[in-house]
Image (cartoon, rainbow, N blue to C red):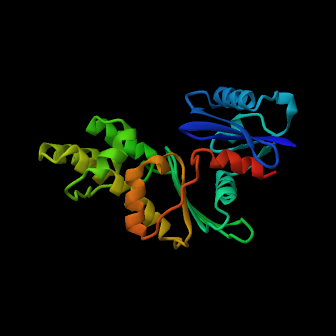
Amino acid sequence: MYVAGLDIGSQSTCAVIWDGEKIRGVALRPSGVNPKQRAEEVLENALREARMSRSSLGKVVATGYGRYQVEADLRVSEITCQAKGVAFFFPQVRTVIDIGGQDSKVILVDPKTGKVLDFLMNDKCAAGTGRFLELMAEVLEIDPGEYGILAEKHQEDVTLSFTCAVFAESELIGLIAQGKTKADLAAAVCQAVAKQVVRMAERLNINPPLAITGGVAQNRGVLYFLEKEIGLKPLVPPEPLLTGALGACLST
């Protein structure tokens, strides 16, 4: 049976077409202001890549914060789907850290059963999320995709005292006025995100192996500081933005 998984997140919407053994098609686009319409678009794009029609699908499974806004045969929480999607690539993983655009999650997984044992979510503030990186990138006048390259060039360890985006922005402006380099400040922002996520993760105890998903998993600067803070080299799936949609497929 062909299954479509839809992950309607706050920043991006993903679709995966699954034939029971392998991925046949994928699509990813920003969620925009109309998640229902965007979900339909990515589903059509994924079907086109798979060279299939919608009538070929046995089921559509939705996850993510927008899962109740779309037509689906089944709706599953993003916690369960992230765990299942990561287990497909790394069945030995015991901890998943998902850092998205508007929230971050820590999920403990039983590698024997793949079931979620416990989880924590930060969805109350921008600290430790992709949104924090975007806001600070505006202050630094860089593209968020430049964080990794800049952080690798940092020479001086600079620490941001505040994780609140409002106070951190003021602090960052003050550090710019002091003449700190863009590379040092980019590294400081990445480190602030890593520290905030690790602080939350330590409340559950981080059990290795550890995997990182979400858009921030593509930020080499944050990955570097996460590894430094935790003392573990995290595993990153080949497509860290698609694990939720893949997990939705695997939830049937």
Q: Vertically, is 159 above or below 15?
A: below
In which quadrant is the N terminus drawn?
A: top right
Q: Position of residue 12 (x, y in %)?
A: 56, 37
Q: How many marks?
A: 0
Q: Residue at x 49, y 66 (%)?
A: 201
Q: Is residue 167 visible?
A: no
Locate residue 63, reporting x and y percent. Answer: 69, 45
151 or 134, which lies in front? 151
- With 85 as the anchor, is 192 left or right in this view? left
Residue at coordinates 42% horizontally, 71% vertically from top-left? 231
Asked whether residue 83 appears in the rendered view, the answer is yes
For residue 48, which quarter of the picture?
A: top right
Query: Does residue 50 lie above or below 220 as drawn?
Result: above
- Image spot of residue 137 (x, y percent): 33, 39
Nearest the eye: 173 or 211:
211
Front residue (pair 247, 116): 247
> Residue at horizontal 39%, vertical 58%?
224
Query: Residue 178 in the image: x percent, y percent?
Result: 11, 47
Q: Is residue 207 left or right of residue 37?
A: left
Q: Residue at x 61, y 36 (%)?
A: 13
Q: Quadrant of residue 88?
A: bottom right
User: Residue lying furthest left in this view?
Assistant: 178
Q: Left or right: where does residue 169 sit relative to residue 47? A: left
